[in-house]
Image (spheres, rainbow, N blue to C red):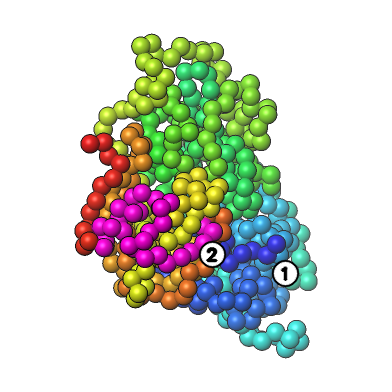
Amino acid sequence: MPLSHDHIRTTVERYLTRHPHEREQLDALLDALDRPGDDIASRSTFTGHVTCAAIVVDHLGRVLHVLHLASGKVLAPGGHTEPFDDSLAAAALRELHEETGIPPQAVTPWPGYETVPFDIDIHDIDAHPAKGEPGHVHFDLRFLFRLHTETKAEVMLQEEEVGGIEWRPVDRAASPSLREKLLKLPLQVEPETANASALIYNDHGQYLLHLRDYFPGRIWEPGMWSLLGGGREPQDATLEHTVRRELAEEAGLGLADLTSFGTEYASDAAGTTVPIAIYAGRWNGDPRELRLTEGVMLAWFAPDDLHRLRIADTTSDLVRRHAATRPACTVPQRGLAPEEERRASPHGTVLNVIGVHLYLERPDGTVLLGLRHPDSVYAPSTWHVLAGHCEQENAVTCLIREAREEAGLHIERSDVELVHVVHHIDRAGDRPRMGMFFRARAWSGEPQLREPDKCTRWKFWDPAALPDNLVPYTRVAIEGIQNGELYSETGWPA
């Protein structure tokens, strides 16, 4: 199945979150993604199409280049995507293997760049009359990899396309934009651990596992049981900060104490290896009460049950090794009922989840609502405004991204205004949430079902006749907006 525009767009937006100053120079790529009918993953789309390159750095800090015979230029290994590529990064690895013979398992994604391009470049390609190809544009997404220090790269060149290879110092990298980014990167002999996971256990000898979404090629360990965690972000002072942030973002979970349990090395089916810092913590709550924002579900499992799960051997071994350091089973706190024990939590600052919401009102006064999918974890078969959680981005950027991804609506930043904030919780003890409602004074496009697994229908409703099955805090916010009120609260105990 060809790479989807949604996958390409998500990858590009992740890149722009780190390099917002490059948005204007990538306008041609963003415009191409917005053109209906153009498959920019196909090499036959001559208005411009995507290519992928592998930036490989060896243990001496040198960058791999190849001589492309077609262009006569020395470039990083790379080329066109194919319909069978699982992801853009996978396309880069395939091209590396085809052009140089270096297999995917000989390299490791640079920490923090597992799914995010290191550089994106747009360049013109000359016409090739012999092949019937007019001049066109390449949108080149470049992914960064480290050659394993124990690996001797045995090169087998694709002779019809590649004339030779060269390992260049960083300051001689062929691409100026790539050279600039590489010079800012600490090219230490071994990559710094930039991923952290939480090994959470309870007093009954069980471990909390996370069933991940099944998105092959797009996420790590798709459809498998794993630990909660993720990659280090610029605001994380330490990897403990990383794992605490990930617990809060993915599950609304805060733990009083976390202890370092060392570094593990996880491998996927292709042999790609990533170092992960492991932090262990005790929690006796009910995972069904957590607000899961990624993946399918959370559940407790005893080490003896792991053989029944689809789980990586490294994760299973990690759980068993940790279990061996603890008593077989401990007794829950006496004097506390199970419900009280679950709800016990440390006092102090509580992180609030920030959500952005689109208040889209047509000239006739009707307001856009979407009917959530019956299988939605949150508010199934219930009407709600277009909404999403802030990632590593500001709220207005998040709103514009969500409107485009969910409904194909295009909104300019200058047309956005904040019209209401609702501070709400669903039930006592849940993580508090701050819902920011933004009005779009102008927009282009009509609502489309871009994510049918989340929303099954868009409809404009009269605010005086809203549907009965409407998310409660959404009703409160719409009424507040209609009354000119800027703030409301709902769900808090009296």
Q: Amino acid at mark 2?
A: Leu
Q: Residue furthest right?
A: 160
Apparent side of residue 110 relative to residue 101 in the rendered image (left or right): left
Where 183 sits versus 275, above or below? below
The answer to which image quadrant residue 474 occupies is bottom left
Pinpoint residue 196: horizontal percent, then vertical percent: 47, 39
Say which residue appears at 54% left-offset and 59% top-offset: 456
Q: Position of residue 445 (x, y in %)?
A: 46, 75
- Between disc 2 and disc 1, the foreground one is 2
Please identify the residue farthest to the bottom as the structure is shown: 129
> Which of the two labelled residues, at mark 2 and mark 1, occupies the earlier sequence position?
1
Residue lying at 38% horizontally and 59% vertically, measured from the top left:
466
**Which label was assigned to residue 422?**
none
Q: Secondary structure at mark 1?
A: strand
- Viewer can see residue 241: no
Q: Quadrant of the image for the C terminus?
A: top left
Residue at image mark 1: 162
In the image shown, does 25 or 100 lie closer to the viewer?
A: 25
Q: Position of residue 315 (x, y in %)?
A: 59, 32
Tell me where the magenta segment starts and ends, as one range: 455-482
Characterize the local packing of mark 2: few (<14), some (14-19) or many (20 or more) Cα atoms within 10 angstroms: some
Question: Mark 1 is on which residue type?
Answer: Val
Residue 309 position (above or below residue 82): above
Give the residue at mark 2. 449
> Could you classify mark 1 by the number of other residues whose Cα lies within 10 Å: few (under 14), some (14-19), or many (20 or more)?
many
The reply to whether the magenta stretch includes residue 41 is no
Viewed as shown, does residue 42 lie left or right of 399? right
Helix, strand or loop for disc 2: loop
Q: Residue at x 52, y 62 (%)?
A: 457
- Can residue 461 be seen in this snapshot? yes
For the residue pair 75 and 29, the one nearer the viewer reads as 29
